[in-house]
Image (tube, rainbow, N blue to C red):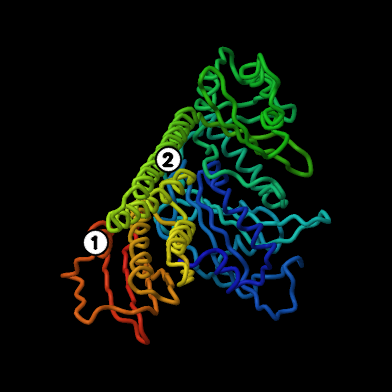
């Protein structure tokens, strides 16, 4: 399905600022759909880019028809459209209410319910206006609001409040006052209409409280009724009786600005989001959405504690490995047998490569590591132990990216072995690690221009401990493929093909 941006760029004459406004609108219009108990479809005018008309002129646009660029279904009532409408094109005159709302720049509610689908549907249209810095506006499209009337009944006080609030929001959309220009983006986990809703008057007093909103305040310690109370002072008294009042709380709870905040009392954490209602040039009140996020914040704290514990474990493992490496290095210095000293030095390098991975993981927020940093340190470590007369500096070409720890640890060890093997036995002048990500696989090629492989080399029968370790790591732990071949032009080329985890 094409995105809103794709449809706007390909089929309309809207500019980048218009597109940003529409993105802000559709990112937050679930609120309007839920308050309206209705489906929302955003229609944009199909215009020829070379046409002389501009969108600000009355009646401009819509000559070529309309295209549906976004759609939202309500969570508070039955939907009208079970199929996706986005991308549908409507000819001029095909949808009378859309044409009327656009041409007359007003909300259209006239007309009888439509029974063409076998279900009674009430159609309304709302012109979408973008506020401009000079105080004027630019009309961008029309919202079609479709209400399924099949389950219509006598509305309750809650439903009447929802519908009145929806009417006010629709008027704000038509006046270019919603979404809120210049405000901070709304969080993904912001309260929804069903979580709890308060309606405030201009003075910040509660005129209606939904049952869920009242329950949230009961958990904060409220024993009286919310209706008639000044929400800012009441909330401050419940949550900040012994400490300075949070200024954001007073702004949000009074409904003076479109912001969010959280309050806590008695172990209960409640999130508040204010939506000022500005109609006809003046603030008539506000909506405050409320959500009890106590359990959510508790789980987040548990995850943070767990994450900190894991990082501390990686840090301690790294320290222990470095201690082991230091002991092995000390033992190697005391050995008089060259073969034994060389074996211990190889063990030091292997332990060191694992320690590098754990050091990186100890600073990462999750069980993922930036492997480019690890690879560069492994390459530098290999270059430091190469023969001084060779003066070989291994190089990395390409990017590993971020890898999970289950891949990073064995890959670091394999890379250490391959570099060390090339430096010790190949005596190369050049040594490179070439990396390429191919979809869900990682290709790593380690090549050198050294002596090359023995004539009778066979990977399956080799007695090299380093190559046996590499093969076990690549094929056993990483489920990858290992190939060692003579390099064209001299030297050796080792290829690792490693599948990357999908999650």
Q: In what element is the residue under mark 2?
A: helix
- Residue at x 45%, y 51% (from the top left corner): 120
Q: Which residue is mark 2?
A: 319
Q: Position of residue 339 (x, y in %)?
A: 27, 58
Q: Quadrant of the N terminus?
A: bottom left
- Neighbours of disc 2 within 10 Å: few (<14), some (14-19), many (20+): some
Q: Is residue 294 above or below residue 20?
A: above
- Residue at x 60%, y 32% (from the top left corner): 272
Quadrant of residue 16 within the rendered picture? bottom right
Mark 2 or mark 1, which has the lower sequence index? 2
Question: Left of 54 or right of it: where is 348?
Answer: left
Q: Position of residue 150 (x, y in %)?
A: 42, 45
Q: Which residue is mark 1?
A: 465
Q: In what element is the residue under mark 1?
A: helix
Q: Is residue 204 above or below residue 21?
A: above
Which residue lies most toward the bottom here?
Answer: 489
Q: Position of residue 93 (x, y in %)?
A: 59, 70
Q: Nearer the viewer, residue 73 or 427?
A: 427
Question: Left of 426 or right of it: where is 206?
Answer: right
């Amino acid at each position: 399905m094409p995105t809103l941006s794709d449809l706007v760029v390909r089929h309309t004459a809207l500019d980048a600022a218009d597109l940003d406004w529409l993105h802000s609108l559709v990112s937050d219009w679930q609120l309007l759909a839920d308050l309206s108990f209705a489906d929302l479809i955003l229609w944009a005018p199909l215009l020829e880019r070379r046409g002389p008309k501009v969108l600000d002129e009355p009646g401009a646009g819509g000559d070529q028809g309309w295209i549906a660029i976004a759609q939202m279904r309500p969570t508070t009532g039955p939907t009208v459209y079970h199929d996706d409408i986005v991308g549908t094109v409507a000819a001029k005159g095909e949808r009378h209410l859309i044409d009327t709302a656009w041409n007359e720049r007003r909300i259209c509610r006239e007309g009888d319910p439509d029974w063409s689908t076998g279900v009674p549907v009430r159609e309304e249209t709302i012109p979408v206006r973008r506020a401009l810095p000079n105080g004027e506006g630019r009309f961008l499209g029309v919202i079609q609001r479709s209400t399924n009337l099949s389950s219509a009944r006598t509305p309750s006080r809650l439903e009447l409040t929802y519908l009145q609030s929806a009417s006010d929001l629709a008027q704000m959309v038509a006046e270019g006052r919603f979404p809120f220009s210049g405000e901070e983006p709304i969080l993904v986990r912001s309260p929804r209409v069903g979580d709890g809703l308060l309606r405030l008057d201009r003075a910040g007093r509660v005129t209606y409280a939904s049952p869920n909103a009242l329950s949230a305040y009961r958990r904060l310690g409220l024993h009286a009724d919310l209706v008639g109370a000044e929400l800012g002072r009441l909330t401050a008294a419940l949550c900040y009786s012994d400490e300075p009042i949070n200024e954001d709380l007073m702004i949000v709870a009074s409904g003076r600005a479109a912001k969010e905040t959280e309050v806590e009392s008695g172990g209960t954490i409640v999130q508040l989001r204010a939506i000022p209602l500005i109609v006809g040039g003046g603030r008539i009140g506000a909506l405050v959405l409320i959500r009890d996020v106590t359990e959510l914040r508790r789980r987040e704290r548990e995850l943070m504690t767990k994450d900190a514990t894991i990082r501390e474990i990686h840090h301690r493992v790294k320290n222990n490995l470095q201690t082991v490496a230091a002991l092995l290095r000390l033992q190697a210095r005391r050995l008089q047998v060259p073969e034994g000293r060389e074996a211990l030095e190889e063990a030091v390098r292997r332990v060191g490569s694992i320690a590098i991975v754990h050091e990186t993981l100890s600073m990462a927020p999750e069980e993922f590591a930036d492997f480019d940093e690890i690879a560069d340190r492994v390459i530098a470590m290999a270059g430091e132990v190469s023969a001084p007369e060779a003066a070989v500096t291994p190089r990395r070409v390409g990017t590993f990216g971020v890898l999970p720890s289950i891949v990073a640890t064995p890959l670091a060890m394999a890379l250490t072995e391959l570099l060390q093997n090339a430096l010790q036995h190949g005596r190369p002048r050049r040594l490179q690690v070439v990396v390429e990500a191919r979809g869900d696989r990682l290709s790593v090629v380690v090549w050198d221009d050294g002596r090359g492989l023995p004539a009778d080399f066979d990977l399956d029968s080799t007695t090299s401990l380093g190559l046996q370790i590499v093969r076990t790591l690549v094929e056993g732990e990483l489920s990858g493929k290992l190939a060692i071949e003579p390099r064209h032009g001299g030297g050796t080329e080792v290829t690792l093909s490693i599948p990357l985890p999908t999650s």
